Amino acid sequence: MMRAWMLPILFVLSGSAVATGQILAGSPGTAAALLTAFLVLAGTTSPLLFPRPVGTREAQRRSAVDGRPVVYWRPGCTYCMRLRIRLGRGARRLHWVDIWRDPAGAAVVRAANGGDETVPTVVVAGRPHTNPDPAWVREQLRAGPPH
């Protein structure tokens, strides 16, 4: 759990140090701009950007009922952030599994990717797709459950 927050915390601490240096150098405007940039980076790399994760079993159960894809991800992954941001509000309709919190999810990802924990791995109708195009994932949501 803590490692999911390491990068955001590092951004906040680094931004604070840089901003303090700018204030001491007499540039409060630059300090505010830099601190804001670091805080934005902290926010985008935090687990807060993603919908609340569920466990693998629960995600698979829900997906079997509603036909929606399961997304295996981890905090700090730029490809996961890209997918999440490009899906917009539609991301909430997916079932998200944080592989750092769920060892069973990490095992699913390793099985799908030759032993590697490559994320995002999106499972649609039982088939894994590694780092799929966000537009394709959006289409899977629109298409609904397979018949």
Image: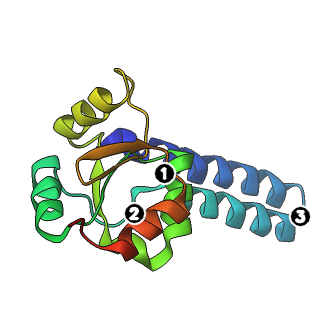
Circle nearer the viewer, 2 or 3: 2
Left/right of residue 79 with respect to residue 59 in the rendered view: right
Disc 3 residue type? Ser
- Give how far across and how far down residue 36 sits, in percent: 69, 67
Q: Is residue 7 above or below residue 139?
A: above
Which quadrant does the C terminus fall into? bottom left
- Give how far across and how far down residue 67 sits, in percent: 21, 66
Taking the spot 62% from the left edge, 64% from the top edge, the residue there is 40
Residue carrying label 3: 27
Q: Earlier in the sequence, mark 1 or mark 3?
A: 3
Q: Secondary structure at mark 1?
A: helix
Q: Nearer the viewer, residue 3 or 138?
A: 138
Q: Residue furthest top?
A: 115
Determine contact: label 1, label 3, CB under 8 Å: no
Residue carrying label 1: 80
Gap in angstroms between the C-alphas marked 2 and 3: 35 Å
Residue carrying label 2: 50
Left/right of residue 43 with respect to residue 72 in the rendered view: right
Q: Is residue 70 above or below residue 145?
A: above
